[in-house]
Image: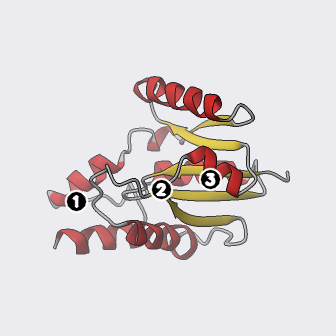
Amino acid sequence: MTKVAIYPGTFDPITYGHIDVIKKSLKLFKKIVVAVSDVENKNYLFSAEERIDIVKKALFSDLKLNKKKIIVISFSSLTTDLCKRYKSNIILRGLRAVSDFEYEFQLAGMNRKLNNSIETLFLMSDVENQIISSKFVKEIVKLNGNIKKFTTKSTIKSLKEKYD
């Protein structure tokens, strides 16, 4: 177990689905780089800096995961370039449902064309978390719903502050 894996995403905000993928990947890899996308063509609720802070609080304060095994960064480059920077040939992607597969399959293929030494590893979150999406979590909070089954305490606090 000596490899570094890159887990890219928007994490706007991080959910228990994302966290399941991170926990499972920690069993497979020495180090995980949680890479928070900062591509400008997206309409994020939180800035990249806020999302990094939210992810760190969720992983390290709320869940007490090992800081030595997880690096949280932002990036605005190709994921394949990020792999080069961290000497990784593994990209982690989470799958929730069949509807995710077509997009993820195409993305994995494009990354492979950009760098044929890169492998994409698909991990599924636990069954109870497969329905969770950041989009729905934001919508529920906006409508004053309860999201404690979907994300961590510190993330809920950040969401509520954003919508207040």
| Vertical side of 55 occupied by 76: above or below | above
Instruction: Give the SS element for disc 1.
Output: helix
- Residue 90's mark? none
**Looking at the image, is mark 2 or mark 1 nearer the viewer?**
2
Q: Position of residue 85 (x, y in %)?
A: 69, 57
- Residue 76's mark? 2
Give the residue drawn at x 43%, y 56%: 11
Identify residue type, mark 3.
Answer: Leu
Q: CA distance from mark 3 to mark 2?
A: 9 Å
Name the residue that disc number 1 marks.
Answer: 141
Name the residue that disc number 3 marks.
Answer: 82
Give the residue drawn at x 16%, y 73%: 164
Q: CA distance from mark 2 to mark 1?
A: 28 Å
State how the image is colored.
Answer: secondary structure
Identify residue type, mark 1.
Answer: Val
**Looking at the image, is mark 1 or mark 3 nearer the viewer?**
3
Give the residue drawn at x 28%, y 47%: 136
Mark 1: few, some, or many residues within 10 Å (few <14, many ≥20)?
A: some
